[in-house]
């Protein structure tokens, strides 16, 4: 019976949009049931469960749907990131940890048929049907109530903690609206007030998005959503005490427009986006200043940064030989970092138009979890603010390429100038311009690898950027100008 139940659960998980192992042979090798959030005579009965999914060691893991691939293949020795080393097994078995909130009903619920996980005999409840709790409005209310009540659910080997921060204006009566359009995580809307973001593929330790939102809220920064609280848990895993954040409750941003979609609409209409770009620059500058006060700052050598970028470039060349033509210029661009030092701090880490929302109250910056292809340890390391700045500049370039036309290049140039001037309070000096050029080049190289693997028809966009940034022309061709349409002139 247990094998049958595991088979049902694995089948349901593997079909979910947020499952990262699609196309791979997966096995359910662990199942941790945290404490009940409801009394055993209350229906639905709700609890949070942690599922371990393992993969044969001879398979090379693919990036999660919607995520960019990394350019490194070594395993990470911490549960919850892209590769895991299962303990107590013969050989290295990669595995991932997933959170599955489950609502149990005594009989099938037709309106929840799309969310059914398994039919089973539970030791506490008897014969039940388990559903994805994020799709069950009654279960969603239980999760919100637990957070408002600051619940602690303790068992001998686990504890679930609901930690509210500022819940003014929230009510357990807010109508839950499960959202089915997510990929890597799942969102539940509560009325017009809040959104509960339920993390699916887990990383052990503190979630960067929660940590950063908390710090920025405390600093009074208006350019991010209000954090109402979070859910985390501790449990025993392969003989070790571990903990992970399971979800965060944030302000629902009414009337918000996705920054990427808005930029494309504006460009398609032939209108300027410069003023909005300037506002984004000022918002990022305010966030960076607050992060400098809230988290440790340091310096790193330009030589070390250049070496890291060079190593990434050499890996990228093996994947995308088109980069070979620009090697001298790229390496010279990176080499200009070697003479000095760089200030580093907590940054966004994956900043682009898709991480912004335009609301009636101004721009809001979202998703502070960092670049998804990097390990948690890498994302925790302080980085240069130029990483975020370069990410937005490359995003403007992609927007221009997505709406090609005679005015696209000028539109991109205006966005860049407005964003940089607003962020820096004026033009950049020669040293800052050289550092930015290196970071833009590094980002474009990363994009080339992504496009080669996922969207070959788009690879001309970042290759054109590498060519322009390296100021180098491959033998027998004309220079590629910074025209985001990818047309060679």
Image (spheres, rainbow, N blue to C red):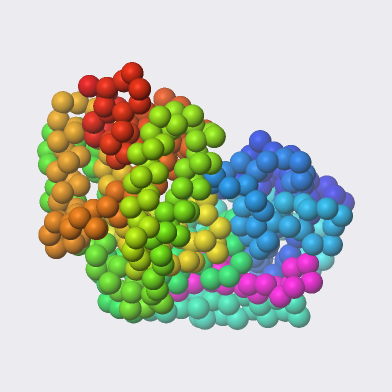
Residue 73 makes an appearance in the image: yes
> Which residues are the magenta region?
228-251
Query: Is residue 231 a member of the stretch shown in magenta?
Result: yes
Residue in the image at 63% along x and 47% along y: 73
Residue in the image at 79% along x and 72% along y: 239
In-image side of 114 versus 248 (left or right): right
Q: Where is residue 153 in the image (x, y as percent from the top left)?
A: 64, 78
Residue closer to the observer: 378 or 229: 378
Residue closer to the observer: 348 or 231: 348
In-image side of 19 versus 208 (left or right): right
Residue in the image at 45% along x and 31% along y: 324
Q: In which quarter of the image is the C terminus?
A: top left
In-image side of 338 versus 38 (left or right): left
Residue in the image at 67% along x and 53% along y: 75
**Residue extending furthest toward the top:** 476
Q: Position of residue 306 (x, y in %)?
A: 42, 54
């Amino acid at each position: 019976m247990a094998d049958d139940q595991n088979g049902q659960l694995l089948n349901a998980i593997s079909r979910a949009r947020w499952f990262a192992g699609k196309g791979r042979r997966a096995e359910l090798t662990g199942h941790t049931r945290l404490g009940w959030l409801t009394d055993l005579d209350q229906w639905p009965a709700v609890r949070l469960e942690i599922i371990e999914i393992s993969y044969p060691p001879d398979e090379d893991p693919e990036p999660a749907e919607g995520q960019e691939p990394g350019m490194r293949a070594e395993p990470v020795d911490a549960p919850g990131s892209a590769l895991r080393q299962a303990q107590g097994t013969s050989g290295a078995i990669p595995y991932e940890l997933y959170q599955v909130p489950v609502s149990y009903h005594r009989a099938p619920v037709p309106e929840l048929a799309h969310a059914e996980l398994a039919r089973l005999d539970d030791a506490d409840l008897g014969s039940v049907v388990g559903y994805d709790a994020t799709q069950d409005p009654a279960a969603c209310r239980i999760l919100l109530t637990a957070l408002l009540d600051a619940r602690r659910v303790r068992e001998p080997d686990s504890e679930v903690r609901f930690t509210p921060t500022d819940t003014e204006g929230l009510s357990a009566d807010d109508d839950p609206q499960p959202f089915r359009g997510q990929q890597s995580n799942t969102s539940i809307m509560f009325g017009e007030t809040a959104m509960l973001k339920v993390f699916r593929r887990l990383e052990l330790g503190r979630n960067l998005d929660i940590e950063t939102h908390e710090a920025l809220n405390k600093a009074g920064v208006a350019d991010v959503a209000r954090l109402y609280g979070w859910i985390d848990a501790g449990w025993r895993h392969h003989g070790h005490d571990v903990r992970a954040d399971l979800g965060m409750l944030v302000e629902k941003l009414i009337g918000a427009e996705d920054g990427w979609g808005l930029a494309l609409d504006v460009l398609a209409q032939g209108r300027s986006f410069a003023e909005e770009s300037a506002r984004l620059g000022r918002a990022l500058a305010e966030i960076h200043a607050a992060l400098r006060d809230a988290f440790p700052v340091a310096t790193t050598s330009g030589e070390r940064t250049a070496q890291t970028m060079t190593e990434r470039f050499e890996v990228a060349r093996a994947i995308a030989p088109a980069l070979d033509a620009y090697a001298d210029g790229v390496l010279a661009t990176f080499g200009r970092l070697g003479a000095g030092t760089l200030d580093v701090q907590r940054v966004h880490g994956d900043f682009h138009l898709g991480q912004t929302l335009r609301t009636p109250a101004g721009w809001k910056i979202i998703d502070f979890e960092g670049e998804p292809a990097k390990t948690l340890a890498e994302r925790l390391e302080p980085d240069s603010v130029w990483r975020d700045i370069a990410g937005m500049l490359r995003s403007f370039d992609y927007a221009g390429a997505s709406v090609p036309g005679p005015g696209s290049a000028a539109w991109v140039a205006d966005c860049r100038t407005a964003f940089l001037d607003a962020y820096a309070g004026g033009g950049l000096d020669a040293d800052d311009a050289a550092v930015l050029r290196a970071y833009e080049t590094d980002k474009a190289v990363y994009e080339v690898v992504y496009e080669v693997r996922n969207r070959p028809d788009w690879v001309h966009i970042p290759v054109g950027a590498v060519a322009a940034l390296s100021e180098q022309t491959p033998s027998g061709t004309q220079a590629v100008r910074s025209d985001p349409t990818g047309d060679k002139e």
